Image (cartoon, rainbow, N blue to C red):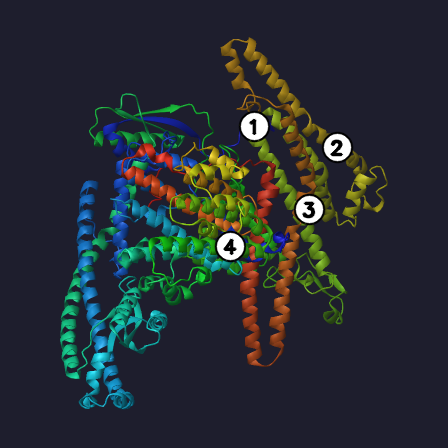
Amino acid sequence: MYGFEALTFNIHGGYLEAIVRGHRSGLLTVADYNNLCQCETLDDIKMHLSATEYGPYLQNEPSPLHTTTIVEKSTLKLVDEYKHMLCQATEPLSTFLEYITYGHMIDNVVLIVTGTLHERDVQELLEKCHPLGMFDSIATLAVAQNMRELYRLVLVDTPLAPYFSECITSEDLDDMNIEIMRNTLYKAYLEDFYKFCQKLGGATAEIMSDLLAFEADRRAVNITINSIGTELTRDDRRRLYSNFGLLYPYGHEELAVCEDIDQVRAVMEKYPPYQSIFAKMSYGESQMLDKAFYEEEVKRLCLAFEQQFHFAVFFAYMRLREQEIRNLMWISECVAQNQRSRIHDSVVYMF
Amino acid sequence: MMKFFDNLPPMDHLRSEKMSFVQLIIPVESAHRSITYLGELGMLQFKDLNDDKSPFQRTFVNQVKRCGEMARKLRFFSDQISKACITSAGRPAMQPDISLEELEVRLAEHEAELLEMNMNNEKLRQASNELLEFKLVLLKAGSFLVSSQNHAVPAERELDENIYSKERDRESLSLLDQETPPEMLNKAGLRFISGIICKSKALRFERMLFRTTRGNMFFNQAPAGEHVMDPVSGEMVEKIIFVVFFSGEQAKTKILKICEAFGANCYPVPEDTSKQRQMTREVSSRLSELEATLDAGIRHRNNALASIGSQLWKWTIMVRKEKAVYDTLNRLNFDVTKKCLVGEGWCPVFAKPQIQDALQRATIDSNSQVGIIFHVMNAIESPPTYFRTNRFTHAFQEIIDAYGVARYQEANPAVYSVITFPFLFAVMFGDWGHGICLLLGSFFLIVREKKFGSQKLGSFMEMAFGGRYVLLLMALFSIYCGLIYNEFFSVPFRIFGESAYKCRDTTCSDARTAGLVKYRDPYAFGVDPRWRGSRSELPFLNSLKMKMSILLGVSQMNLGIILSYFDAKFHGSSLDIRYQFIPQMIFLNSLFGYLSLLILIKWCTGSQADLYHVMIYMFLDPTGDLGENRLFWGQKPLQILLLLLAIVAVPWMLFPKPFILRKLNTERFQGRTYGILGTSEMDLDHEPDSARQRHDDFNFSEVFVHQMIHSIEFVLGAVSNTASYLRLWALSLAHSELSTVFYEKILLLAWGYDNPIIRIAGLTVFAFATAFILLMMETLSAFLHALRLHWVEFMSKFYHGDGYKFRPFSFASLADEEY
């Protein structure tokens, strides 16, 4: 396939690429965000969104609106679009599309397990799960007492099963364990996804390796920052980093020994692509890091649309839509809580 | 000549309606009413004066929101009504009109009522569902228990005995324990849970149970037999009743959790059969009570819905109208005093009195002290294009608009298309048998116009219905052309007398190739039927149709160029007439006009001259001897003259216009700099239209390149467009050949057999081939080719098509809109 995508891509992927590009043009623009930021109430937001692609999803909502409804409905739209694409997709695109949801699956597993640990109601937890990461027996997760049971009872049926090979222990579940499990799973998932994309070859591999490398590096930085001051050993920390990406392997060695945020910064500034992200922040600050990373990610995702005949557009579209939902959630929360001055803090504009 | 054109009656249909840009100043108190009246009139297109404001910053946003809310409620009602499968009793008796506020209150009441009823029904439904499930579980699981006990007893006793025999060795003390009845053991060690689960989940459920209990369980299942309503989707789903036997307290909690996770409902079933029966009876009686209540509730709800349903349509229209009015009001601006609304928009000049009348009525009806000011303003942008059409011309106008909406007051090709379009179609589709079929089809559509117009049609029918009058004319012209071609399903008829030819002797009736003699006057109308089947049929018809195509093409292209003259004259642009229209006329007619002349002469004189030769050597060797190709006296000098004219016409249409434009521009520029302001303004008005460009910077190279492209396009186009009209011949040939093939190779072939089955089969195949290939596909292809000839060959000569449509604010279009 390498180098000759233009010849054969449209046989199977042409229709869906057209679909996804059509969806892309439905993403909210800067002008839309500017209008949304001026909204006074949630009804105003609904009114503005009714002129966009969200219109049909919100039009039948009764008027005292809640932030959760907006988020729920916009997620529903994403899920509908995803399902439509998945139904139309053929191999290997369908596998690629399924890979996109594994991240949510991991998050959902972690959410349920943590929730049952703290003795929350399962139904309540299920409502909080991301609909893209749902699988059939997700509710049964509540039965499991430790990792081994978790694997043996439930996850063995899911696509996540192979990722579990590294974290099967008989230890009882606790918060720390779960967090380590999440990151181990994520690591295995990213590596697998990376390998899959490399196998696909062509422009898909090229663009996806860039996007996934960024994702892996961001996770590495986040793991480092979050594990500063915890009892996680350096080796354990080192083991959670994904084995690819720009930081691999030398950056990982250095990140593993970092003791505070400024050391992380010093490590990252050696890498030109990340220098600009850290240059935006003052020393010792890590609050704005998330936003800076999101902005960088959105920039990279948008670039994926510049090339044709590859699968990365699907990944990029899903991620951009998710970012858009985060933006909507932030805006609606700010509007609902009368914090309109902070509205611009967390909104990442695209296109 | 010019006088003649000037004295022609004004051609109303050729130009779009004169529009004027008007301003309305409406006092706030009469604003709503006046906009409503204007919406009923539907003759004013409002310009959005608040373009920079987002929708929720506009003045009447709250009213729009309220309308949106009401529309939502109405959608909710119609959704509920369609779910309850109530057919509303058409348009009900009109009830007194109610105001929007009342309607809002009423809708809110109805919604609350309906929601409450839904909730109650939902509760009842859930309870009855549970009871139903319980009943099913009792029935099925009870029978499991009974049968399993019967089977299990001997087996278990055996097992027990084994265990006890081993135990006996260890401790032979408790002999009494051996007497323990198996039922008791059952109670101590083996427990069971019974319940009901969706069939689709059963397999995974069983697997999960197996895994959690490490296989230490026994799963028994049976289909429920009845469909049970799923509480989430409200659909009837198939369910399965299960009984799980297991041992141990921990397993029980696990299994209960899994049941919960899979949405399986567990119900306790007593082991005792008599108790089971008693419970079943109780449950059944309660179930029937509940069903009765539920039915009463549903009847009540249906009545409520039916009463809403009878009003729903009227309310929907009303809310839509209100919303449209407020949306329009949002396009208006407040003036400085905040007491008046200022609106701007376009209206056709003829509608002004109507609008003024409507505004006056609005003022009176709303008891306003101040009238509405309505006056004409100057506009910078070009006005919208508005053609008044009726149901006959509408389809033709749509055909033209599909290419591009006419520029304001530009010549409208639709006027000519009404005839030329069906005619060119018919030239390609000439067969009066097929024409009659089309005619019947179009009659069918036209006769049932009222019925079809009010209902939704499929996309294909919609298209056919929209173009029913086009279809009618196409059919009429096909019959006409078919009579000329003398084709009726490819069979020649002798309608207009006998053939002019007859056989010289008896042999020619078999040969049919030679030996015909002309013995009487030519056949009165169309092609002589004798041509059919003769060896010279094709060469004769080809020559006829090819020449005819060229004649039709040249005349239609000339019409296009003449229309460009009328356009230029209308806009007062003598520059376009002198340097575009005249050289174009000369170029086209000196080459292809001359060809048409030759064709006519050849037809009239019956000369044997080779026209290809004449045309080709007119270019290659203009001075050479014509020889036998000479058709008339003075042909050679005329040809040389025409050739020279054509050569001169090319630079004529290329060079002068851009240079003159540049000169005019520099003059105007000087006039502006040094002249008195007033006179320069005057100059502006007197200048020809094409020079009055809106953007003041005159870019000579751009204009020149533009002119060059146009000239080259015309010169090359003259050749290629003429050749393009040959498609008339080609398609007509294809059509007649196809119908001949179907007629001769299918129908006649089948008729040759003396077998009714083969004859019927042949007839069926012929009928289907005629209907689908000749009537549908050929109609479509001829339609498309006629469309192309109009869009490309005809309209490119004069039509700009860069205008925009007049879209008045009107209630008329609201009713069939869906949202």
Pointer 2 chain: B
Q: Element at badge 3?
A: helix
Pointer 1 chain: B
Circle on res. B731 = none
- The residue that appears at 37% across and 57% down in the rendered structure is A109
Labels 2 and 3: the sequence-earlier one: 2
Pointer 4 chain: A
Name the foreground residue: B497 vs A41: A41
Kind of residue at disc 2: Ile
Residue position for label 2? B647
Marks 1 and 2 share the same chain: yes
Residue B179, how many percent across, how many down?
A: 19, 90
Q: Is residue A350 visible?
A: no
Q: Element at badge 4?
A: helix
Residue position for label 3? B723
- The residue that appears at 36% across and 42% down in the rendered structure is A328
Kind of residue at disc 1: Lys
Residue position for label 1? B569
